[in-house]
Amino acid sequence: MNSDLGSDFATVAATERFFCSEGARLRGDPIAGTASHGVVWVLIEYRGGWPLNGFEGLGLEPETKALVLSAAKAARARVLLVRRPGPRRREGQSHWAVLHHEDTGAYRQQWGTWGKDEDLAEIARALSLPGTLGYPPVILVCTHSRHDQCCAVWGRPVGRALSERWSELVWECSHVGGDRFAANVVVAPDGVYYGNLDVESSVATIKEHLADRIHAEYLRGYTDLFPAQQTAVAATLRRFGPAGRNDYRVVETSRDGDYWRIRLTGRPPHPARVDVELQARRATPCQLTCRGPAMSSALVYELISIRAA
């Protein structure tokens, strides 16, 4: 573990307060199959404090905010507040973006700026357009402390470290889900969630990701897939080695009660076909987030078998 983050974690462990990320690490909670589903993101740069419920809690012009939220809901887009890591810049216009992940594997983005609330209305129009090819991916690090303190404790050091390497790509962001897996990093519009990252592992993981080599160790899942499918992909990468984002495709999914059978096809030099069998079960009830109910039970998928053809 990186020494900077290790000292943060030691400080956390020394307190009497509950930290969900510490509990998840001690339990060994599986991270595969935990990425939030979705293929469209709206990013809004906001340099002030982030409310508990993110964009919805901002005191913006009501009609504009309602327009953005309505358009995002229609597009099934996730709205995230973002800001650059480090000292907060107060001057100048802020940015917004609409990011799309397509079934073909293409990634499209549209960017704009805003200085007054009404400028954000342009997001609604952007959500109805296909966007432009050719932008590099965006690296989002959840640091939403008002939603969960673990996101700040683990996320901020990771955000700083990644920003030192890829300053134009990295943003801190509001809640992305899975607080107990902080630090959480989302690469969009690739649609890839990583979790349980520290400073050292985050730099290595993103370096590999940008070279189109995705590893299983810190992978929570691909956001265009559902949890069982995400787990099958992670199991495949763990068994047969890292692969590009679009090197495997889920082509069949069937379920019989708690048992899942998922077939993937792979591009050379990866296996042409992989059949994965999983069993779903409820984990032992525990407190899953710092702010959540005292006891809750997560659904996990255990690998039964994996075969290549």
Image (spheres, rainbow, N blue to C red):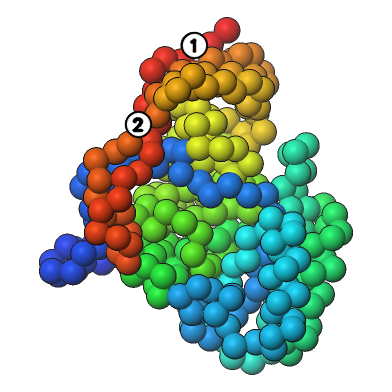
Q: Is residue 122 above or below residue 60?
A: above
Where is residue 12 drawn, in percent x and y? 21, 66
Residue at position x 63%, y 41% from top?
224
Q: Position of residue 131 (x, y in %)?
A: 83, 57
Residue found at the very far front of the displayed protein = 257
The residue at 53%/74% (across/down) is 54
- Helix, strand, or loop for circle 2? strand
- Judging by the rendered image, the residue that carries numbered circle 2 is 281
Three-letter amino acid code at the position of disc 2: Arg
Q: Amino acid at mark 1?
A: Arg
Task: State the residue at coordinates (77%, 86%).
Answer: 118
Instruction: Single out the mark in the foreground, 2 or 1.
Output: 2
> Residue 286, position in %: x, y?
24, 50
Tell me if mark 2 has few (under 14), some (14-19) or many (20+) residues whose alpha carbon lies within 10 angstroms of its own. Answer: some
Please identify the quarter of the rendering in which residue 270 is found. Answer: top right
Identified at 38% across, 36% down, the residue is 300
Mark seen at residue 307? 1
Give the side of residue 77 with respect to residue 235, left or right: right
The spot of residue 49 in percent (x, y) is 49, 84
Name the element at disc 1. Answer: strand
For residue 17, the mark is none
Question: Taking 11 as reference, is 271 above or below it?
Answer: above
Would you say residue 284 is visible in this rendering? yes
Marked residue nearer the N-terminal end (2 or 1) = 2
Foreground of the two, 178 or 205: 178
